[in-house]
Amino acid sequence: MAWRLHSSLRVVLSAAIFAALPLAVAAEELVAYKITNKTSIENSLTGKPGDPVNGRKVAINRKQGNCLACHALPVPEQPFHGEVGPDLSAAGSTLSEGAIRLRIVNPKAVNPDTFMPAFYRNDGFTRVAKKFQGKTILSAEQVEDVVAYLMTLKGN
Ligand code: HEC
């Protein structure tokens, strides 16, 4: 398989070189991923399926996924759901697992003009505070947990 030397892999390599710098510590753990047809990431970032129960928590946590800021989800205990992005209540029946994974990892690969943040991409940002450089919003495990959660959403 022709694996491109993806930019996140380069981040990992430079993190190894600058391993003494504390801000590079999180980047060292970054997983390289492969985008297929500009539409999906087929393989789990962790190599195993995520935990949908934890994924729900990550998705609705305002300091983690914060998906409710822009999306409606079947989460009745939280009253305010955003409308900037599409309703995700049936994401698991309308989108493939790989498409959901790419959306979460790096939605700009799908739509360069999107408002949606990249949750697992730390390169290419134009203005990133020093303390966040080399860090992603979610860990690879958290991405997979949110993917697994969205795959359970089949609408009504
Ligand atoms: C700042 C707003 C914002 C946040 C936060 C956000 N999104 Fe999005 N999302 C969008 C927008 C806007 C779109 C519409 C497509 C586009 O812009 O390319 C979208 C599209 C999507 C899609 C594709 C839906 C479809 O039907 O094609 C998925 C899946 C998705 N988001 C998942 C998530 C998840 C999961 C989270 C939380 C981890 C999240 N989003 C957080 C704004 C956001």
Image (spheres, rainbow, N blue to C red):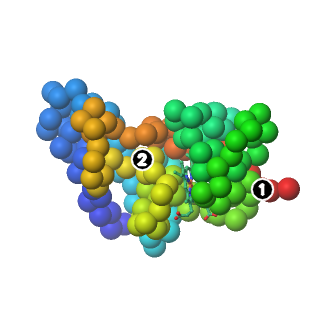
Task: Give the image quarter of residue 85.
Answer: bottom right
Cβ of mark 1 under 8 Å from ligand 1: the answer is no
Question: In this rendering, is residue 43 above or below 21?
Answer: below
Q: Amino acid at mark 2?
A: Tyr
Residue 152 visible from this viewpoint: no
Q: Residue furthest right?
A: 156
Q: Position of residue 140 (x, y in %)?
A: 46, 41
Q: Earlier in the sequence, mark 2 or mark 1?
A: 2
Residue nearer the viewer, 98 or 21: 21
CB-based contact (under 8 Å), mark 2 and mark 1? no
Q: Secondary structure at mark 2?
A: loop
Q: Amino acid at mark 1?
A: Lys
- Residue at 63 percent across and 37 percent down: it is 60
- What label does residue 154 carry, if any? 1
Q: Position of residue 52 (x, y in %)?
A: 66, 40
Q: Quadrant of the C terminus?
A: bottom right
Q: Secondary structure at mark 1?
A: loop
Residue 113 visible from this viewpoint: yes
Q: Residue furthest bottom?
A: 37
- Residue at 59 percent across and 45 percent down: it is 69
Q: Position of residue 19 (x, y in %)?
A: 18, 31
Instruction: Give the Cα separation between the discs numbered 2 and 1.
Output: 25 Å
Q: Position of residue 1 (x, y in %)?
A: 37, 66
Cβ of mark 2 under 8 Å from ligand 1: the answer is no
Crowd around label 1: few <14 · some 14–19 · many ≥20 (10 Å): few
Does residue 146 appear left or right of residue 153 in this picture? Answer: left
Find ligand 1 in the image and state its quadrant. bottom right
- Residue at 23 percent across and 51 percent down: it is 10
- What label does residue 120 carry, if any? 2
